Amino acid sequence: MYRFFKKKSFKILLVAVAALLLLLLHTAVNGSVLLSNVFTFLTTPMQKVSASVANGTSEAVESLGTSKEELLRENEQLRQEINELNQQLSDYYQYKQENEQLKNFLELKSTNPDYQFAYGSVISRSGAENFYSFRVDKGTLDGVSVQDPVITEAGLIGWVSSVSAMQCSVTTILSPSVRIAAYDKVTRDTGILTSTADASDSGLVRLSYLEENQTVKKGDMIVTSGIGGIFPKNLRIGKAVSIASSETDVSLYATVQPYADLKNAKDVLIITQFAGQGESLPESGEDAS
């Protein structure tokens, strides 16, 4: 025991206890001022750190709010620019398509300077029950009239069967009502372009009323003759694919595969004027000859 009291650690403990007793005595005499000062001394650095962190957080939040507003404005501006670019791209494709289509008709116009055109796009289409008739976004305001011929760069597709100020309906040559004077470009044999329900289902037409001695051959080009004043001369119709005897009389007919894609046409030219137009108009506003 005596050795324990003589150890250095024991002496340090006694000094610490004495210091604590003096602190308690001083606190009892002078109130809690000293203790408060000690607490203040110990906590002040922590308070400064806390205040600094709070101020930094506030500044960061304020900075983030400003950046967010700027980003929203920039996003809106970019969105508007993208919309404008998309519109320009759409216009570009439209103009490009029109230019490509019009190039295909350049030869037709150059060889037929009397032709006047209205360029149109198909906006709606009927099915097989209406022989693939369709509507075009051109009307009387564009000079379009009933019975105007309608073509694609490939060939004849039909005629205008009704028209309003800004639209028109087109009946295709697949319709059984079709009656177009036509001839074989190679042999010069003449006939009338007609159609039947069966032929229409196959996307075909007929060059009917061919006389027995006529010499239309498979592969010959069939074109309009211009007789009747509804269609100008030499519009391409299609090629003969077979020759057969008529079911109703002694004449022959040639089955004709149209050059134009009658069922899927998207852009067309309406011939609004041509030399000889309107001569010998048929009584029916629906049939064409």
Image (cartoon, rainbow, N blue to C red):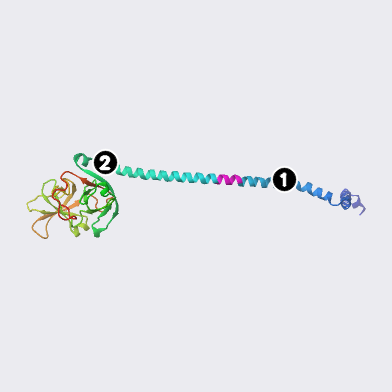
Q: In the image, 275: left or right of 92?
A: left
Residue extent of the magenta highlight: 62-68
Looking at the rendered structure, the secondary structure element under dot 1 is helix
* Depth check, front residue: 243 or 154: 154
Query: Which residue of the protein is positioned furthest toward the top in this rendering?
Result: 110
Quarter-wise, where is residue 251 in the image?
A: bottom left
Residue located 72% across and 45% down the image: 48
* Depth check, front residue: 116 or 188: 116
Q: Residue 146's x, y, as percent?
A: 21, 51
Q: In the image, 60: left or right of 223?
A: right
Q: In the image, 94: left or right of 47?
A: left
Q: What residue type is labelled 1?
A: Lys
The quarter in which the N terminus is drawn is bottom right
Residue 168 forms part of the magenta stretch: no
For disc 2, the marked residue is 103
Q: How crowded is mark 2: few (under 14 residues within 10 Å), some or many (20 or more)?
A: few
Q: Which amino acid does label 2 sit on?
A: Lys
Q: Residues within 10 Å of mark 1 (few under 14, many from 20)?
A: few
For disc 1, the marked residue is 48
Residue 256 shows in this picture: yes
Looking at the rendered structure, the secondary structure element under dot 2 is helix
Residue located 25% across and 46% down the image: 118
Q: Is the magenta stretch mostly helix, strand or loop?
A: helix
Residue located 51% across and 45% down the image: 73
Query: Which residue of the protein is positioned furthest toward the left in this rendering?
Result: 213
Q: Residue 119's x, y, as percent?
A: 27, 46
Residue located 58% across and 47% down the image: 65
Marks 2 and 1, how far apart in space? 80 Å
Q: Which of marks 2 and 1 is nearer the N terminus?
A: 1
Q: Residue 198's x, y, as percent?
A: 19, 59
